[in-house]
Amino acid sequence: MRDFGSKTLFEKIWSKHVVSTIEDGPTQLYIDRLYCHEVTSPQAFAGLRERGLKPLRPERIYCMPDHNTPTHDQDKPIADPVSRRQVDALEANAREFGLTYFGMLHPKNGVIHVVGPERGLTLPGMTIVCGDSHTSTHGAMGAIAFGIGTSEVEMVLASQCILQSKPKTMRISVEGTLGKCVTAKDLALYIIAKMTTGGATGYFVEYAGSAVRSLTMEGRLTLCNLSIEMGARGGMIAPDETTFEYLRGREYAPQGEAWDKAVAYWRTLRTDDDAVFDKEITFRAEDVEPMITYGTNPGMGMGITEAIPSRHCERSEAISTRHCERSEAISSSADCFVPRNDAPHDVKSLEYMGFHPGERLLGKPIDYVFLGSCTNGRIEDFRAFASVVRGKKKAPGVTAWLVPGSWLVDKQICDEGLDKILADAGFELRQPGCSACLAMNDDKVPAGKYAVSTSNRNFEGRQGPGARTILASPLTAAAAALTAHITDPRTL
């Protein structure tokens, strides 16, 4: 019989941060860390100013530009006037309100979801918010992390709290061993393709299972980063020795006796054995191959050797669903985890991409390759890319943007000699920033061009008006950069 005092990892952290609960309403939740970037914060700071307020806990707030920053000539004024105004506004607001600010060229600057974990600002057991949907990244450290809107940014600035309805809980377990050239990015795209882009709506997901436990810390960050793409409020992984070793010695992580005390607490941050989730789903790692997308949302993905699906809504044998005592009965339509490509929006999506049902994309010519973003801009991603291109040459005609997720990653690339490997293969490193993940800076893919991208979204125009994005892992991106077409990295 279930012990009703048992809790999931999410419930343990959530309950520890509850300030008050409104009857039949939201919870007032205390927030440990607020990250601010230049796009979603100006109106929030303006709201504080209009009300004569100051941040309640300024020491818990960290600001840095990343979306609008150029990835070249950062020592010069930003050419685009809109981008320049947003970046300048963040610096001015941080100065006025006494907040920590890591500006362009600052050694701690970078994509905010890369900098947080690598500096030890993100820690297990925390509640973390940012005006950015991919805040779910930080859940990989064993934290509750989620994106919020600008008005909510103002709320947290003023009170260090936020009003939130408690989401339902879901556990996605992946058992087994991932195959050759199958990365955390492939696993994430596989799960999203099976779940669809709305399959986890209303849930906070905990990833578990032997395949998840075997992921590196950076792989876990990639997996949790993409949780939002299946509609989840966030994703998280219980902290373990992998987490502790990653954090040990990081600048903002506890040190000395405080470290030992913190780790002792972090070890308690696991789901109790008899805790019950609202929904549980299991996948087999052996069923995942290198993945690519073929449409205009991350759920339109397939194995790289497969053909674009036509009309079907089959129940996948790769997935099993267990309904728990708190779950509602699930209809047959909710059990369908394979995307429907007979829907009008899917027809439109394929027309936009220039693809057809039944078509295989292996050998499809591509024009651009992008390595970077908060999904795949970490040192491990550059090591993977370099491992494929070492001793080879970039294909003529392919434009490749290799963008470190932070200045620390840039330093690691140079310290490890990866910059020389990349240069010998014909690649150039750019400066840190969000870059071609989204068209808010100079790195825009031209209309009609195909880009194999390690970023997180393939929406219409996401990488530039009319750009066609194919999401993939760093290994698959590297293979495409060498061959000028979609290539199975296992063949290299």
Image (cartoon, grey):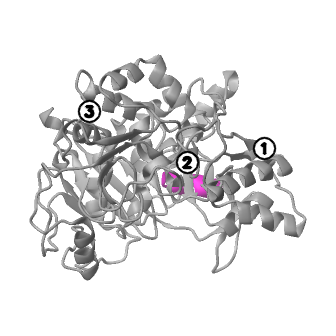
Residue 100: in magenta span: no
Q: Which residue is mark 3?
A: 394
Name the residue rendered at 30%, 44% in the picture: 473
The residue under label 1 is: 59
| Point 24% across, 53% down: residue | 292
Secondary structure beneath dot 2 equals: loop
Q: Amino acid at mark 2?
A: Ala
Residue shown at 69% from the left, 69% from the top:
151
Camera-side residue: 362 or 132? 362
What SS does tag 3 mark? Answer: loop
Q: What amino acid is labelled 3 in the image?
A: Lys
Pinpoint residue 433: horizontal percent, then vertical percent.
53, 43
Viewer-side label of 1, 3: 3
* Residue 12 falls within the magenta-colored stretch: yes
As measured in the structure, the alpha-carbon distance from the residue carrying label 1 to the one carrying label 3 is 45 Å
Position of the C terminus, as image quadrant, is top left
Residues drawn in magenta: 7-16
- Residue 386: x and y in percent read 32, 27
Q: Earlier in the sequence, mark 1 or mark 3?
A: 1
The tag on residue 143 is: 2
Circle 3: is it few (<14), some (14-19), or many (20+) Cα within 10 Å? Answer: many
Q: Earlier in the sequence, mark 1 or mark 2?
A: 1
One can see residue 154 in this view? no
